[in-house]
Amino acid sequence: EITTIENSLKELEELAKAAGAKVINTIIQNKQKIDSAFYIGKGKVEEIKILCDELDANLVIFNDELSGAQIRNLEESIERTIIDRTTLILDIFAQRAQSKEGKLQVELAQLQYRLPRLVGLGKSLSRTGAGIGTRGPGEKKLELDRRHILNRITDIKCQLKEIKKNREIQRKQRKKNEIPVVALVGYTNAGKSTLMNKLISKTGSLQEDKEVYVEDMLFATLDTAHRKIALPSKEEFILIDTVGFVSKLPHALVEAFKATLEEVEYADLLLHVVDATNQDYEMQMKVTNKVLGELNVKDKRMILVFNKIDKIENIHIPSGEDIIHISALEEIGIDRLLCKIKEKIFADMKKAILLLP
Ligand code: GDP
């Protein structure tokens, strides 16, 4: 999906930044065969070691998944903390998770990812890469033996089941009250959190929750956030923000985070937010639509929201019946969007009321 190595590395750099690391160098290895012991060639290992000494780097991130043995071998040779792409993403998730469920899901994913790699994780080197790759369950827990980790996994699964049951009850309650649900979906950085905050401040959220965390970083939205919104004409709906999609989401994470997207299945309307300034926006729309397809919600009512039009110059973006162009930041087109939302979710309801005796 991300075609060039440059784009893939650029995304890795964004991820590293999101985790709190400062990227000081990027190295590309042109090698056909992956070394089972070191992932990269011996010469490259030497080169990285020297570079780390020169640049005073304390962390090396690989843009792939590494085995436990590879991590141990690399750490012994390079004498730095080594982490792979999945561990990096898990670390970001661990930092951003807000709800109890989100935290448990991240911990579960981390433990499941570490378990088969335990054998390789050396105890000789303290993992000090600015904490990256060691957050979440905590460094101490790394030393727990397999049995303890397995116990913890069982425990987490049990707790998650309980939370899921409660959520089901809440959802039924909501259905009974017949408050429509509108879900924001889209690629990371499309502007979902910004739009959510704008809608809240413009219409007045009915709850006194704090604003959704917004940052120019990937994964600023990890947990599903709910707000009750009232339209100027008094109709109410629940607005939910969802985790941003990303291309090449590591397999280990897909299952763990599907639960966060479950909310989408119960939505009455989807707002698919697209960053119209991103040159890859068509690919990003495809990724999002693919995930929506997997969740079996492709046939849901949807408004395509092209965002960031304040920054667009001469770029042709599609328009049409269910397409709205907005700037969440500069508050352009928000009224039109609210109108469209109203039309989409309340039009049917109005008719039904008129038919009542
Ligand atoms: P999310 O990952 O989809 O929730 O995206 P965010 O809401 O966190 O926004 C990502 C970045 O895009 C932030 O730096 C926002 O300030 C920026 N952004 C969001 N909406 C707009 C917009 O309408 N115009 C411009 N220029 N930037 C925007």
Image: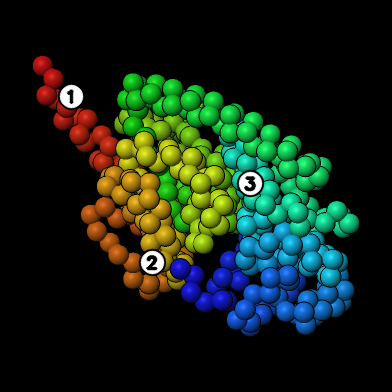
The crowding category of the residue bearing disc 1, from other C-alpha atoms within 10 Å (few below 14, some 14 to 19, many at least 20), is: few
Depth check: give the residue in front, 319 or 280.
280
Which callout, 1 or 3, points to the residue nearer the camera? 3
Q: Position of residue 47 (x, y in %)?
A: 80, 80
- Which secondary structure lies at badge 3? helix
Q: Which mark is residue 112?
A: 3
Q: Residue at x 29, y 55 (%)?
A: 323
Contact flag, marks 1 and 2 (Cβ < 8 Å):
no
Q: Residues within 10 Å of mark 2 (few under 14, many from 20)?
A: few
- Residue at the far top in the pictured view: 357
User: Is 211 left, or right, of 199 in this rendering?
Assistant: right
**Real-space CA distance between mark 1 and mark 2, rounded to the nearest whole angstrom:** 40 Å
In the picture of the structure, the residue carrying the numbered disc 1 is 353
Q: Locate residue 279, reporting x and y percent.
A: 45, 71
- Quick check: can you spot residue 153? yes
Q: Amino acid at mark 2?
A: Glu
The kind of residue tagged 1 is Ile
